[in-house]
Image (cartoon, rainbow, N blue to C red):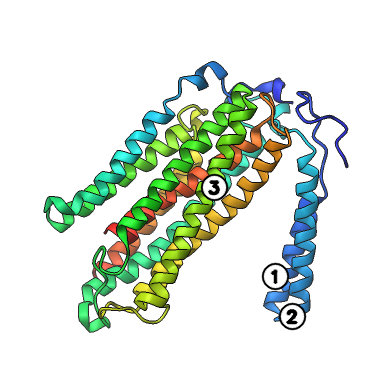
C-alpha cells in the first residue's frame, strides 16, 4: 500500500539528510538559557511576560516545524493543529476578558 | 491473525486486528465500574484492557511498521496523501491541544482572579522562583529538548536504514525521558514534603490555589511523558529486535510526533508555570 500513493509520508531520504536538527537544537538551548536570564535585564513586568511568551512561541514553532516535520508535510496537515489552536485562542480571550473584570 | 510476512517486507497487507476492540471493551467495562462504584467491574475492565494491550503489543512486535493509507488509497484526490495512522495521530494531537488548553486556561483564570483580588482572596500568587526551583526545572527543560533531538535523529537513522544509530538514539531518548520524570518526582517530593506546597496549602502566605493548579498542570504533563516513555520503551525493544527497516519504520515517526508534542507543551508550561 505504501508504494501506491505516496511520497509525502516517508519523505525523500536525500532531503532528510539535510534537515537542520542540530542547528534547531542549538537555537532551542540558547533561547532556553535566555529565558532563564530575562528577569536579570530589569525590564518591566508586562514587557518581560511578553518577551517570555514570544520566546516560548519561537521554540514551540521550531519544534513543530522541524522536529515534527510539519514543514515537510503536505500543507493541509497544518490545518489540524491550527483548528485546535483557533479554539484555544477563543478560550484564552474569553477567560482573560472575564477574569480581568470579575 | 499472525502476520505471515517477515518484519520489513515492503508489500505488507494490513489485516484487521481484534485487540483494539478488546481494549475498547475493557475501557468501557472499567468506565461502567467507575460510574456504578463497582470495584469488581472496574478490576474486570482493567484485566480486559491489560490483556488487549498485551495482545496488541505482542502482535505488533511481529509486524512491519509501514505507512498505511486505508480508504484514501482508493479515493481520487488532488490533496497530497498522508498515511492513515499519521493523520489519526495529528487529529489526536489536536484534541490534546484542547485538553491542555483547558487545564492551563482554568489555572490561568484562577491566577488572574487572584491577582485582581489580591490579599483579599487568601493571598497573592507566588513570584517566579519564590517556591519553585527554576534552575532545576531549566535543567529538566534542557533534558527534554535533548530528548527531542535524539528522537528526531533516531527517525533520521531509521530513514537511512542505520540500525545501530536508530537503537542508540531511541535508547538515549528513553533514558532522557526517564531522567526528566525522575527529576520531576524529586521536585514534587521536595515541594510537597519540604516546602509544604500541598493541594490545600502553600508556604510564604501564597494563595492555596497555587498548589493544586501547579500539580494539575505539571501532573497531566508528567503523565503524558510517562505514556511517551512507555511507548518509547516499546519501540526501543522492537528496534533492538530488528523490527524497523529503511522502508518500514512508521511507528518510530508516530511515537516521535507524540514525544515532540509533549516537548512543545512543556515549552509553554515552563514559561507559564515557572517563569511568569
Q: Disc 3 versus disc 1: distance between alpha carbons? A: 33 Å
Residue at image mark 3 = B175
Disc 3 chain ID: B
Point 44% across, 62% down: residue: B218
N-terminal label among 2 and 3? 2
Q: Identify the disc placed on residue A91.
A: none
B80 in relation to B19, above or below: above
Going by the picture, which residue comes out furthest to the top?
A: A14
Q: Is residue B235 left or right of residue B11?
A: left
Residue that label 1 marks: B31
Q: Which residue is mark 2?
A: B38
Q: Position of residue B219 (x, y in %)?
A: 48, 64
Residue B228 lies, in percent from the top left, at 57, 50
Please report whichever mark, 1 or 2, sits nearer to the chain's N-terminal start: 1
Q: Is residue A15 above or below residue A81?
A: above
Residue at left 69%, top 27%?
B245
Amino acid at each position: 500500500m505504501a508504494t501506491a500513493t505516496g511520497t509525502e509520508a516517508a519523505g525523500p531520504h536525500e532531503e532528510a539528510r539535510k534537515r537542520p536538527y542540530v542547528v534547531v537544537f542549538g537555537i532551542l538551548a540558547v533561547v532556553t538559557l535566555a529565558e532563564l536570564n530575562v528577569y536579570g535585564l530589569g525590564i518591566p513586568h508586562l514587557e518581560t511576560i511578553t518577551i517570555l511568551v514570544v520566546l516560548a512561541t519561537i521554540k514551540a514553532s521550531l519544534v513543530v516545524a522541524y522536529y515534527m516535520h510539519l514543514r515537510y508535510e503536505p500543507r493541509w496537515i497544518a490545518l489540524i493543529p491550527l483548528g485546535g489552536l483557533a479554539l484555544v485562542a477563543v478560550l484564552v480571550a474569553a477567560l482573560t476578558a472575564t477574569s480581568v473584570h470579575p | 491473525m499472525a502476520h505471515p510476512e517477515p518484519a520489513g517486507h515492503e508489500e505488507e497487507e494490513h489485516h484487521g486486528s481484534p485487540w483494539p476492540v478488546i481494549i475498547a471493551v475493557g475501557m468501557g467495562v472499567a468506565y461502567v465500574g467507575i460510574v456504578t462504584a463497582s470495584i469488581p467491574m472496574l478490576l474486570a475492565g482493567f484485566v480486559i484492557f491489560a490483556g488487549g494491550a498485551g495482545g496488541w503489543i505482542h502482535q505488533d512486535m511481529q509486524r512491519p511498521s509501514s505507512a498505511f493509507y486505508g480508504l484514501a488509497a482508493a479515493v481520487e484526490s488532488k490533496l497530497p496523501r498522508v498515511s492513515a495512522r499519521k493523520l489519526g495521530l495529528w487529529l489526536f494531537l489536536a484534541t490534546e491541544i484542547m485538553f491542555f488548553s483547558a487545564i492551563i486556561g482554568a489555572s490561568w483564570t484562577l491566577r488572574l482572579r487572584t491577582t485582581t483580588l489580591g490579599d483579599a482572596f487568601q493571598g497573592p500568587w507566588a513570584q517566579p522562583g519564590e517556591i519553585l526551583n527554576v534552575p532545576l526545572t531549566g535543567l529538566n527543560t534542557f533534558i527534554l529538548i535533548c530528548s527531542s533531538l535524539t528522537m528526531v535523529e533516531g527517525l533520521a537513522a531509521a530513514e537511512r536504514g542505520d540500525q545501530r544509530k536508530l537503537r542508540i538514539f531511541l535508547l538515549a531518548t528513553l533514558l532522557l525521558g526517564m531522567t526528566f520524570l525522575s527529576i520531576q518526582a524529586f521536585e514534587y517530593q521536595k515541594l510537597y514534603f519540604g516546602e509544604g506546597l500541598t493541594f490545600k496549602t502553600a508556604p510564604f502566605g501564597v494563595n492555596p490555589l497555587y498548589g493544586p493548579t501547579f500539580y494539575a498542570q505539571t501532573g497531566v504533563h508528567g503523565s503524558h511523558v510517562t505514556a511517551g516513555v512507555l511507548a518509547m520503551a516499546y519501540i526501543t525493544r522492537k528496534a533492538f529486535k530488528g523490527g524497523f527497516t529503511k522502508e518500514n519504520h512508521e511507528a518510530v515517526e508516530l511515537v516521535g510526533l507524540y514525544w515532540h508534542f509533549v516537548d512543545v507543551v512543556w515549552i509553554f508550561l515552563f514559561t507559564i508555570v515557572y517563569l511568569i
